[in-house]
Each structure stands twice: as structure tokens, then as C-alpha cells.
Amino acid sequence: MEWKVKTFDQITRDELWAIYYARVQTFVVEQKRPYQEVDDVDFNALHIWAEEDGKLLAYARVFHGEDHTTFGRVLTTPAARGKGLGKKLIEKVLEEIDEHFNHPRVEIDSQDDKENFYAKFGFKAVGDVYTFHQTPHIKMILEK
């Protein structure tokens, strides 16, 4: 398995296709949420993914918020689920945040059912559950 970390301009055509395919498969098709999944954030994000034999297994993007760093579009593909890759992905995301971003706070909008997963990394839920793209979410913060 190989980790890749690239800006939008560094991503190849085939890599971009694999990223968008996995994101739409996960967030639009599997989760039955029709929304504009591909957006302008991609242009300024740092894209992080794991692949093996040319196949994307896990993905997330990291970018600047107003006064914090954030990440999203966190996924593992169906073939890679249940193998601990989600944990490795978040560890890699936090490592890249330390290396490339200069904010002491990481703030995410987590799907509500993933709150316990992110708590294992030190994230704390703040505020009430809210709906974002037809799915319950909660804001979570990690103070570094």
C-alpha cells in the first residue's frame, strides 16, 4: 500500500477520476444523498489517499478554514473496509496537517454516527447536531 499526498495541480487525470469515482460512490450513491459532491474546495485542498495496485482504498482532503484547518470527504472504499484503514487515514491526515498547515486547531463537520470514531483521536463535539447534505452532522474540534 502506498500513501499519496498531492495538491490539485499535481493529481493526474487517472488519479482524479479514481478520487471522484470513490467520493460519488460513497457520499452520493451509497449514502443516497444527491448533492454537488465535486466542488471548488478541491482546487485549494491537499488530497491524501492510499492505493494498492493502482486502486484507491481510502481518501480525505485537507484545507484551510477561516481560523482553523479542516478536513473532509473521508472515506474507505467497500473493498478496504473493516481492515483498520480508516484509523490509518486519520493518522496520516493529522500528520500532514502538522507538516503543511499552521493552525493550532482542527475543526471538522463529522457525520453524527462517526462522532465516537473521531473522539478516539482527541476530537471533542461542540454544539448540537445539525443537518448538512441531508445527513446529521456535528462540529468537532481538536486543539493541538
Image (cartoon, rainbow, N blue to C red):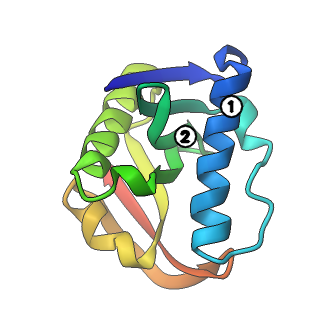
Tag 1, which secondary structure?
Answer: helix
Under mark 2, the amino acid is Arg
Q: Is residue 36 left or right of residue 50?
A: right
The image shows residue 47, relative to residue 79, as above or below, that is: above
Q: Residue at x 45, y 52 (%)?
A: 77
Residue nearest the viewer, comparing 71 with 18: 18
Pinpoint residue 37: horizontal percent, then vertical percent. 73, 57
Dot 2 alpha-carbon crowd within 10 angstroms: few under 14, some 14 to 19, many 20 or more: many
Q: Secondary structure at mark 2?
A: strand
Query: Are the two marked residues, 1 and 2, in contact with CB atoms closer than 8 angstroms?
Result: no
Q: Position of residue 54 (x, y in %)?
A: 49, 25
70 relative position to 36: left or right: left
The residue nearer to you, when weighing 127 against 133, is 133
- Front residue (pair 47, 29): 29
**Which part of the image, by quadrant, shows the N terminus?**
top left
Quarter holding the C terminus is top left
Q: Which numbered dot is residue 126?
A: none
State whether residue 34 is above or below residue 75: below
What residue would you read off at disc 1?
A: 16
Amino acid marked by disc 1: Leu
Residue highlighted by disc 2: 61
Alpha carbons under labels 1 and 2: distance apart: 12 Å
Q: Position of residue 137 (x, y in %)?
A: 51, 76
Residue 10 higher or lower than 133, as above or below: above
